[in-house]
Amino acid sequence: MIGDKKIGFIGAGAMAEAIISGIISAGVIKSDQIFITNRKNQERLDQICRTYGIPEENKNAHHVRQADIVIIAVKPKDIDLVLQIWGAHFFAEQLVISVAAGIPVTYFEKKIDRVAFIRAMPNTASHVRLSATAICGGTLANSRDLDLAHRIFCAIGKVLVVKEELMDAVTGLSGSGPAYFFYMIESLEQAGIEAGLSRDIAKELILQTFMGAAQMLYMSQKEASQLRQEVTSPGGTTMAGLEMLNRYDMKEAMIQAVLHATNRSKEIEKLYASECKTEE
């Protein structure tokens, strides 16, 4: 629980809903302590409030402005508009958390210098409360602020505190990671079909295999490379499969995917950082 603190959400998209669902279900907060607003989709606000028992009067911009914690849950392209509309309303005692990918804390602090900001990078697995989320604090964020953010995001998965200079790597690895996984599933499903299985059977086998392997790695003290070696018998079927992965250099492809996504995150961050310097 976070006591009687109020949490306001700017934005009512999928990420906002995932966080709301998680913190209510985990008992972090009661539904009447949540306030929410968005720019134009009233139906969406109505649907979220009905689903999670948020009082009708809580879908109000005025109440969001008064919240102890404000979560900015909009797309990166909408950040400037949010700061234009909301910047003057943030006050010194508030904690503001952004889940907009690629936007550095320094950008928020340059625009609004009186507020403690925290940058968070959850991923799409937030919807099933298995997100890998990294958080970092700005210059005004203290350990209490980080603890509050940690409690919020623990409701939708695992949380790690990192330095901001590592957030681009987090974005490239775990932020984009679910897409890499889904891409692998697509490929394996097609392989199963070409080997004679139906799509449904292939998908069920793949998902159970991945969940089992992930649980083994999670519970084991062994490295992934060791578990791989233990399951690979000389001259066996697994070795035959791995030989093809090595031939097509799957490891290098995965490494480059993460590094390329990381670099793209850095490019986005530089755009906002350069804007801060221009304003100086």
Image (spheres, rainbow, N blue to C red):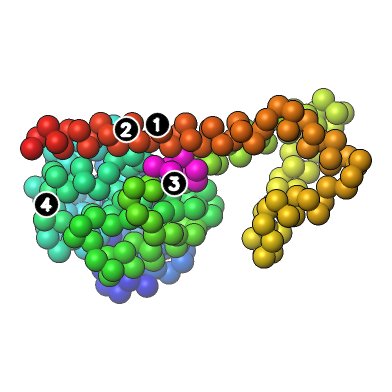
Q: Height in image: 264 above or below 23?
A: above
In front here: 140 or 145?
Answer: 140
Identify the element where label 2 is drawn.
helix
Instruction: Report the side of 89 relative to 138 (left or right).
Output: left
Residue that carries the numbered disc 1 in the rendered image: 264
Lower position in the chain sequence, tag 1 or tag 4 = 4
Q: Say whether residue 44 is visible.
A: no
Provide residue 216's location: percent of width, then percent of height: 71, 59
Q: Give the magenta-colored segment's residue range.
A: 168-175
Residue that carries the numbered disc 4 in the rendered image: 113
Lower position in the chain sequence, tag 4 or tag 2 = 4
Task: Name the mark on residue 205.
Answer: none
Per the image, is 169 magenta? Answer: yes
Lower position in the chain sequence, tag 3 or tag 2 = 3
Per the image, is 170 magenta? Answer: yes
The number of numbered badges drawn on the structure is: 4
Residue that carries the numbered disc 3 in the rendered image: 170
> Mark 2 is on which residue type?
Ile
Task: Name the mark on residue 268.
Answer: 2
Identify the element where label 1 is drawn.
helix
Q: Height in image: 97 above or below 76?
A: below
Report, in whole angstroms, how far the alpha carbon at label 1 lies from the one at label 4.
27 Å
Lower position in the chain sequence, tag 4 or tag 3 = 4
Report, in whole angstroms, how far the alpha carbon at label 4 lies from the one at label 2.
22 Å
Question: Crowding near pointer 4: few (<14 within 10 Å), some, many (20+)?
Answer: some
